[in-house]
Amino acid sequence: MENFKTYWPIEKLKEWDKNPRTISKENFDRLKAQIKEVRGV
């Protein structure tokens, strides 16, 4: 089996509805901005 990675645009990320933990919209937007910064997007 091949080893591969799937990348999605950060703008398309959304909170997983089955996750027992929640995150506010502000914190989720902040998280996406941090991911962009780390990845150099």
Image (cartoon, rainbow, N blue to C red):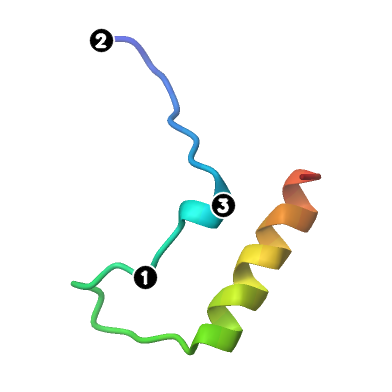
> In the rendered image, which quarter contains the C terminus?
top right
Residue 40, numbered label: none
SS category of the residue bearing label 3: helix
Q: Are marks 2 and 1 in contact (CB under 8 Å)?
A: no
Amino acid type of the residue that numbered disc 1 sits on in the rendered structure: Glu
Q: Which mark is residue 1?
A: 2
User: Is label 3 or label 2 in front?
Assistant: 3
Q: State the image coordinates of residue 2 (x, y, percent, origin top left).
A: 33, 10
Q: Secondary structure at mark 1?
A: loop
Mark 3 highlights which residue?
10
How far is disc 3 from disc 2 in space, using C-alphas? Answer: 27 Å
Q: Nearer the viewer, residue 9 or 7?
A: 9
Q: Position of residue 15 (x, y in %)?
A: 37, 70
Residue 38 falls left or right of residue 22:
right
User: Who is closer to the viewer here, 8 or 39?
Assistant: 8
Q: Is residue 12 above or below residue 1?
A: below
The furthest residue to the top: 1
Q: Is residue 4 left or right of residue 34?
A: left
Give how far across and how far down residue 23 sits, in percent: 44, 85
Measured Cα–Cα span from mark 2 to mark 1: 30 Å
Q: Which residue is mark 1?
A: 15
Among the 4 quarters of the image, the one containing residue 27: bottom right
Compare marks 1 and 3 and give the one earlier in the sequence: 3
Dot 3 amino acid type? Ile
Q: Nearer the viewer, mark 2 or mark 1?
A: 1
Q: In the rendered image of this protein, does residue 40 appear above or below residue 12? A: above
In the figure, is residue 22 to the left or right of 40? left
Pick whichever of labels 3 and 2 is earlier in the sequence. Answer: 2
| Circle 2 residues within 10 Å: few <14, some 14–19, many ≥20 | few
Task: Note whether 18 is above or below 22 in the view shown.
Answer: above
Q: Residue at x 56, y 52 (%)?
A: 10
Residue 24 percent across, percent down from the top left:
48, 89
